[in-house]
Image (spheres, helix red, strand yellow):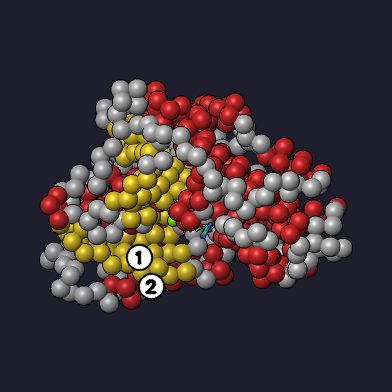
Amino acid sequence: MPLTFASPTITPTIRSFTFSSRRTNNIVMSAIQPNSASLCPILTKFQNDCATPTPYLRKVADAIVDEMQAGLAVEGEGELDMILTYVDALPSGNEEGLFYALDLGGTNFRVRSVQLGGKEERVIATESEQISIPKELMIGTSEELFGFIATKLASFVAKEKPGRFQLEQGRKREIGFTFSFPVKQTSIDSGTLMKWTKGFHVSGMEGKNVVACLNEAMEVHGLNMRVSALVNDGVGTLAGARYWDEDVMVGVILGTGTNACYVEQKHKIPKLQSKSSSGTTVINTEWGGYSKILPRTVFDQEMDEKSLNPGEHLYEKMISGMYLGEIVRRVLLQMCKTSDLFGQFAPAKLSKPFVLRTEHLCKMQEDNTDDLQNVGSVLYEFLEVETNLNARRRVVEVCDTVVKRGGRLAGAGIVAVLEKIEKDTKRMSSGKRTVVAMDGALYEKYPQYRSYMQDALVELLGHKFASDVVIKHTKDVSGIGAAVLAATNSIY
Ligand code: ADP
Ligand code: MG
């Protein structure tokens, strides 16, 4: 497997993956020993229910393409919102000046300043700060949430070093606001929140203009800044990666939540009732909303019923970081109740929703010790349970089943987007390199998830097309992308 490491100017860490040869995958199963599946009917049934053989994945990819087309045809049709982003011009590299990025979309909120220096210098200087969002603000009021953001933004700007960052005279500081929830965009700098996802439930915000909410909060806090571009993290990732590489056609997020954005031909968007239908624009698929053909189990159903958005974002609930640990927890709990997974009783902690996180699954699957010592420590630390080797093996099998399903389904989604692009542009069949910019800690930090995803891509695309596809891990470029889009859409 050719893995290349390249670091362009300043920030982004970029790791590319191409598919020119079949990989021998020996890391994926490292924590699973042969013959470990001593009979456990629940586990066996769960594994069967989660199976995603190639022909099944093909159906998933085709169904996603159908939903994409339905969403492009008529507003509100199809399971994918296929939101118009109003990003018609992607970065060229010529952008100059000081711009900001503000990213709200999950566990953390980030602010970044970027001094752009045009084609030669690109990013002259950049600084960023990450602030975790207090849990209570995720389910509080919009004044509380945006007030918090404005305060943090104000103190970030106050710390700015004048030598490194220079605002042109007579300009306000302009922000590219990355807001990674489904938004009905009404222009490049306004959009209304359609629904909260990923555990957020701030009251009275659905249907409101999110830019207005931020502007009001900035005004209250005496902050002289304006939002020039409202984007989501997929668009930011696509734009940021495109700033350095013109073959980037898709931006994918695999973190707390998931989404994909891509470059679409305007004349292939029937619902775009604009005079000019030439050129391209970026579509935000909101693919997390897909649900038609999916290997749903009783555990997925129960988790969905208990979620803040029941019946919605079912694809996201199978493939993104927020949910993988919780699915595993539910399976383990059932295994405790019906077999003696951890001895006679289920550990009390196992009844606590979201006690097992995706990070824990990852740590357990990385265990290479003969007696799965690290699995034992994770289970002891987070579930307060002593385990024997057999129990540890079973736990790892559950993790692997959930992660395999998630990774493979994510791969099918990427194939769907690539095939939609291919239909209209014939890029891949003409041998043109096509880059998927990828961001998110799930992809970055979970090697097994990544491998399963890559397997699905090769299985579905075939080696011929797969060799022209590059998955580029573009860590944190979405901030740069948002700032560059603020520059592209500056009012000055
Ligand atoms: P966000 O999606 O909130 O912008 P990230 O891209 O950092 O943030 O993704 C965070 C998510 O990634 C976490 O919710 C978790 O599910 C997953 N994650 C974080 N660290 C790891 C890890 N070490 N192994 C596997 N998954 C991880
Ligand atoms: Mg993110």
> Label 1 sits on what residue type?
Val
Q: Residue 60, image x and y in percent? A: 57, 31
Q: Nearer the viewer, residue 288 or 136?
A: 288
Quadrant assignment for the C terminus: bottom left
Q: Residue 425, image x and y in percent? A: 33, 24
Q: Which residue is mark 2?
A: 152
* Number of the label disc, if any, that sits on residue 111: 1
- Locate ligand 2 by image quadrant: bottom left
Kindly report which numbered mark, 1 or 2, lies closer to the viewer in this rendering: 1
Residue 304, relative to residue 61: is it above or below? below
Q: Residue 455, image x and y in percent? A: 51, 37
Q: Residue at x 24, y 59 (%)?
A: 10
- Labels in figure, total: 2
> Label 2 sits on what residue type?
Lys
Residue 360, relative to residue 428: is it above or below? below
Is residue 384 at least partly visible in the picture? yes
Q: Nearer the viewer, residue 39 or 181?
A: 39
Q: Quadrant of residue 426?
A: top left
Residue 177, relative to residue 432: is it above or below? below
- Badges 1 and 2: C-beta atoms under 8 Å apart? yes
Residue 385, relative to residue 14: is it above or below? below
Tell me the element at label 2: helix
Q: Residue 370, image x and y in percent? A: 65, 59
